[in-house]
């Protein structure tokens, strides 16, 4: 992937967020009939169908839909930090019924041969990185468990010196076809051959290494290049690093989903970094030059005399690189210092005497503040709601 977040599931299906189950099924049926790769001539049909399928899977399940409504894609993607979870491919609840109803076969059309080339499954890996790695980028090695083509039988499933034979039940097609009637008229119901399980081949002498499964489980070490400026939830696609395809099909892809740990002091907002700094009353009243931390190291900052709590000082170019869609950086954001004037809770006798003297010169008059935009409103405006 290019680092962008997935599309909204409701937008994919073209329904409102309060859509009923019937609305979801109706929308899914219409889109599935349009984009199913076996009946659609559109160039991106396979990708669109996969996207539609994924959206319907989540929204048609009450628990998954509730998690998605509350947390977005992070609520339904699953997987632990720094760990591996299964691929995006696979069966979808409710899909089989609709598939059989609409794509079992139309008059004059049929599904793709199941024993033809099939792309391998996509995989997902959740990778936890620290705040500095997200800002500056990094190269991280990960160990990915996945199925790989058996080296002993070269993916045939048969022991060396033997070859699979054509399944006599389906004549090597991998499919059993039955004509049935539905509300759409005469349709061909296509199912996997129960004898060869849709492969079209029978292995009489299985490979001892893979036990006739054609693939074996291995752990592959891969290097992930993390661009500068990534954020929590960014996805990086490693093309061809998923599971192997079947019958000469291309391998799937590996999607690395980044999880960024929280920094002790810095808070990120888009490409800006926010840091709250406490100063004492003398520094606020008289002004001072202070050293503050940035992701690039300490930076000297001038605090103007008469500074009030909530004053914001902007350090240009000390934020996070702005990540383009192609993974390149386009400048950096800023670091925003929020100054907080800290009133001491304990004083020495000398400090108390000095404050008492200062208090006598400042007086004791209490001045009510007129209604208007206060400190919290101004800070909210500055940070756009932070």
Image (cartoon, grey):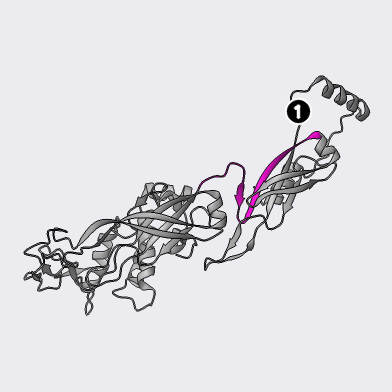
Which residue sits at x=41%, y=59%? Answer: 223
Which residue sits at x=53%, y=53%? Answer: 133
Residue 280 painted magenta: yes
Q: x and y percent of residue 360 in the render? A: 92, 25
Which region is colored magenta? 261-281
Residue 21 visible to the viewer: no
Judge by depth and name the residue closer to the eye, 372 or 205: 205
Q: x and y percent of residue 263 in the render? A: 57, 44
Residue 366 painted magenta: no
Which residue sits at x=73%, y=52%? Answer: 314
User: Mark 1: which secondary structure?
Assistant: loop
Which residue sits at x=16%, y=68%? Answer: 156
Q: Is residue 329 above or below residue 93?
A: below
- In the picture, measured across the screen, residue 268 lies left or right of residue 56, that is right
- In the picture, measured across the screen, residue 359 lies left or right of residue 92, that is right
- In the picture, measured across the screen, residue 193 lies left or right of residue 58, that is left
């Amino acid at each position: 992937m290019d680092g962008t977040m997935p599309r909204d599931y409701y937008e994919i299906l073209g329904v409102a967020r309060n859509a009923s189950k019937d609305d979801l099924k109706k929308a899914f049926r219409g889109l599935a009939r349009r984009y199913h790769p076996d009946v659609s001539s559109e160039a991106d049909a396979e990708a669109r169908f996969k996207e539609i399928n994924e959206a319907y899977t989540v929204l048609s399940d009450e628990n998954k839909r509730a998690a998605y409504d509350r947390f977005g894609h992070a609520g339904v993607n699953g997987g632990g930090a720094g760990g591996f979870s299964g691929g995006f491919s696979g069966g979808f609840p409710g899909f089989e019924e609709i598939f059989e109803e609409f794509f079992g076969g139309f008059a004059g059309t049929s599904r793709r041969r199941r024993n033809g080339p099939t792309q391998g499954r996509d995989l997902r890996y959740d990778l936890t990185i620290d705040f500095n790695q997200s800002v500056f980028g990094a190269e991280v090695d990960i160990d990915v468990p996945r199925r790989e083509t058996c080296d002993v039988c070269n993916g045939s499933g048969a022991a060396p010196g033997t070859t699979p034979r054509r399944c006599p039940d389906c004549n090597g097609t991998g499919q059993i076809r039955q004509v049935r009637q539905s509300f759409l008229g005469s349709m061909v119901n296509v199912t996997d051959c129960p004898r060869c399980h849709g492969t079209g081949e029978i292995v009489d002498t299985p490979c001892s290494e893979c036990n006739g499964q054609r693939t074996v489980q291995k752990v592959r070490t891969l290097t992930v290049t993390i661009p500068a400026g990534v954020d929590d939830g960014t996805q990086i696609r490693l093309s061809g690093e998923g599971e192997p395809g079947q019958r000469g099909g291309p391998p799937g892809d590996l999607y690395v989903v980044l999880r960024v740990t929280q920094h002790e002091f810095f808070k990120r907002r888009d490409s800006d970094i926010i840091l709250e700094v406490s100063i004492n009353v003398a520094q606020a009243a008289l002004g001072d030059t202070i050293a503050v931390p940035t992701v690039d190291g300490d930076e000297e900052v001038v605090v103007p005399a008469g500074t009030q709590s909530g004053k914001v000082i902007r350090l240009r170019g000390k934020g996070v690189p702005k990540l383009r869609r192609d993974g390149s950086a386009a400048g950096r954001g800023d670091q925003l210092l929020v100054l907080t004037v800290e009133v001491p809770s304990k004083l020495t006798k000398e400090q108390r005497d000095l404050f008492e003297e200062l208090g006598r010169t400042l007086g004791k008059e209490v001045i009510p503040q007129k209604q208007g935009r206060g400190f919290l409103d101004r800070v909210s405006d500055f940070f756009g709601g932070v």
